[in-house]
Image (spheres, grey):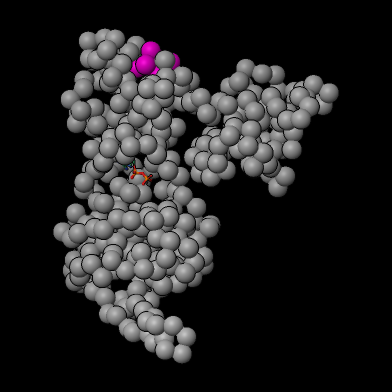
Amino acid sequence: MARQAIVQSNGDEESRRRDAALRPRWLREVIGQKAIVQRLSIVLNACKKLKEPLSHILFDGPPGLGKTTFATVLPNELGTSIQMTSGPALSKPADLLPFLTNVEEGSILFIDEIHRMPRVVEEFIYPAMEDFRIDIVLGEGMNARTINLRLKPFTLIGATTRSGMLSGPMRDRFKMHEHLEYYSVEELAEIIRINARKLQTPISEDAALELARRSRGTPRVANARLWWARHYAASEADGQITLDVARAALDMAEVDRDGLDKQDRRYLELLVGVHNGGPAGVESLAASMTLPVDTLSDEIEPYLLREQFIVRTPRGRMATARAYQVLGRPMKPAPAEDRQPGLFD
Ligand code: ADP
């Protein structure tokens, strides 16, 4: 179990601490996402010159690509403060009140997983985003009255793995909408080299590239792979991450040569072996894996889709030739009578 905790890509406490320790603090330290960095530099510069607050910004993309990183870099650049919360923590408008009444002029309010904010909270935040005011209803029924509270101008930064789940009016209130892409191997190798230096761990050039190649295009995964390789090097070698150490560490963590981990392979095994290559619905795949549907569609599938291990069709997910290849199975789907009864939708 200990090993699993170390190589897990996100979500747990250990991963959160590691991310916070390794997170870039300034825009110039952010690797990759060049076009986004350029656009943000321009708006930051303009805001300073015009003495206006930064416009509301929405970051979207799969987990671990840098949404929180961008959100935390911006207040540093502006010399302002940030308050952080998340959609699931805001179940009613009153949960948002302390954050809104605490905003300082030009400061940032960051809402992670903003697509999971209930509609009533969303509607409560609209006037705050548009006119920097909120309407509070006091009392009930005949005696109810609305008071208007003025807020200091602030910037809302939203992060979402599912921009499609945001309502149209909410999306329209963000003046900037930035979509984060997966990183190239070279960019991830750069992140790994920088973070190895921060962790005072010597790493060879080819080892950094090997870890990068096997990091699912995702900086958070690269951090986790580096962290594990560092522990492996300390325990099983002389503390230096060489190519051999990196390979042995990743093999032991069951990360394969394509960077796929146990969960990715289980997904593909199910789709190919049990669902005969598909099409299979995400709900039935999630049920077979005993994982929430969100974990499949937010964390596992985006990378498999991007790397063309699977395709999405109107009838469900289908395995591609690359999936059969990586599993070492012949492309020809098994005949229907070979299917295991009871395991199909
Ligand atoms: P998200 O909010 O999209 O889930 P994070 O911003 O928390 O992702 O990123 C996870 C970690 O990956 C960060 O703590 C940081 O160490 C690293 N990271 C992400 N994006 C970058 C980047 N562009 N440059 C350098 N490191 C990055």
Count of numbered circles on the image: 0
At x 67%, y 39%, the residue is 284
Q: Of all residues shown, which one is farthest toward the top?
A: 237
The picture quadrant where one finds residue 122 is bottom left
Q: Which of 24/267 is in front?
A: 267
> Measured from the top left, where is residue 237 in percent x and y?
26, 9
Q: Can the viewer see residue 321?
A: no
Q: Position of residue 90 (x, y in %)?
A: 40, 60
Percent coordinates x, y for residue 291 in the rendering: 55, 37
The furthest residue to the right: 337
For this orientation, the residue located farthest to the left is: 79
Res 317 quadrant in image: top right
Above or below, 176 relative to 199: below
Principal secondary structure, stretch drawn in magenta: helix
Q: Residue 236 appears in which quarter of the rendering?
A: top left
Q: Residue at x 36, y 79 (%)?
A: 136
Q: Nearer the viewer, residue 157 or 115?
A: 115
Establish if 322 lies above or below 318: above
Task: Assign ligand 1 to one image quadrant.
Answer: top left
Q: What residue span does the magenta drawing correspond to?
A: 246-251
Can you say which quadrant of the picture contains the C terminus?
Answer: top right
Q: Residue 30: horizontal and vertical position, in percent? A: 27, 44
Q: Is residue 283 magenta?
A: no
- Which residue: 30% across, 47% down? 69
Describe residue 161's horizontal placement relative to residue 314 as left or right: left
Q: Residue at x 38, y 21 (%)?
A: 3
